Image (tube, helix red, strand yellow):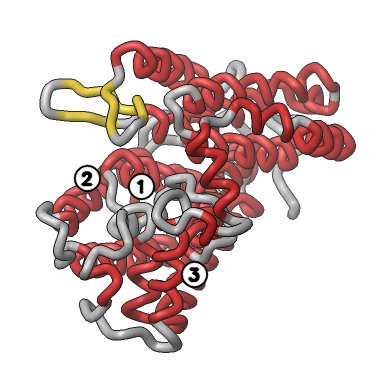
Amino acid sequence: MSLATTSNLRGAHIRAFNARNIRRTDLWLVLCVSALAIIGFLVLLSANRSASTTSAFHIKQAMFFAGGCGVALFISCFDHRFLVSIGPMIYTVFIALLLSVLFIGAEVRGGQRWLHFGPFGFQPSEFTKLALVLTLAWYFTTIGPKIERLPYFLLAFAIGGLPAYLIFKQPDLGTAATLGPITVAMLYIAGCKRWHLAAIVILALAAVPIAWGQLEDYQKKRVMTIVDPSADPQGSGYHTIQSMITVGSGGLTGKGYMAGTQTYLSYLPEHHTDFIFSLLAEEFGFVGSVTVLLLFLFLFFRGLRLARNSTDMAGSLLAVGVVTLLTFHVFVNVGITIGILPVTGLPLPFLSYGGSFYLTVMASIGILLSVNARRGMFDYLERPGTSSFQG
């Protein structure tokens, strides 16, 4: 991938906000997101007919989408270089919020992950993913070629490791694991030495026994479920077994919209959140599942295209960070539903119910639109020896 030359943020003169950016919206990206959002609304409408469901998930999700569209358009109006420049401040705020969660956070389903302000509640861990993307983009564009030196390389993992540790303590292993691929992907794009990355991978594999000892008993059972879910069919293996049955029952074309029995009769728990893809597979079959995956694939390639065509390294880093975040969620969520990965509670973008995650996803789209808005602008400034953060 051919990427722009590394730029320095210091001393940059940036017009932070420009509403005209909306005119330069990537139409294909918007159409893809809209298609996924509509599919998400439809499957949640079907999930709402479950015998055990009393909440109008689809209505709330529509409100999240409307609010998310506003967030995405608002963010797209900012110069992405300005967003990168305030990354450390946003990162500091969310580190403070993650610390607050450990002391005053509300416990929901065995995890202390929520902060409540009156009637409103949110998960700081979700928004921390984007805070990390912005902060790493700032860090890499600030240090430039120094990333090839080992101390600067390791500092990137410290930046990603701190929020990952705080999220892991909630405990939320799935969300904490998301920050690792983001850090590695952005390091690669920033131009680190490949043998540094290889050494980190080897060390990570060597540390697996240590990490295993830090897991809670229920987390260990979830991992072992992948080997043999039938060993505990009514306990840790229940979700995996029921999900695989649900997916397989859809066959080639599915049972039909709102005709799924596994989900309607609530054999599969959490089919409006973590296992929404299982509901999709049951009702629309292999054809419907592949169609949704192709839409995600198009979204990812569109994001990588923005990274390749960005006029500066900051834009490339942001686009790659966002694409990695979304790709990891899709890969892990689908892997869980078909039984090849342990249940970790990672939602599926645009389909799974959840306000904090949905707003994080839409904010991510806003960042991609912001990068696209500047593509092709001020190209005369992007010459060797001149800063690409001027004008």
Give the x, y percent position of residue 222: 52, 46
**Discs 1, 2 touching: Cβ within 8 Å:** yes
Q: Distance between the residues labelled 2 and 3?
A: 25 Å
In front of the other: 162 or 216: 216
Q: Mark 1 points at which residue?
A: 362
Between tags 2 and 3, which lies in front? Answer: 3
Residue at image mark 2: 67
Mark 2 or mark 3: name the one nearer the start of the chain: 2
| Residue extending furthest toward the right | 195
**Between 176 and 370, the one nearer to me in the picture:** 176
Q: Position of residue 372 (x, y in %)?
A: 49, 51
Q: Is residue 351 above or below residue 357?
A: below
| 104 is higher (above) or lower (below) than 120 | above
Q: In which quarter of the image is the N terminus?
A: bottom right
- Label 3: state its secondary structure: helix
Which label was assigned to residue 255?
Answer: none
Amino acid, disc 2: Gly
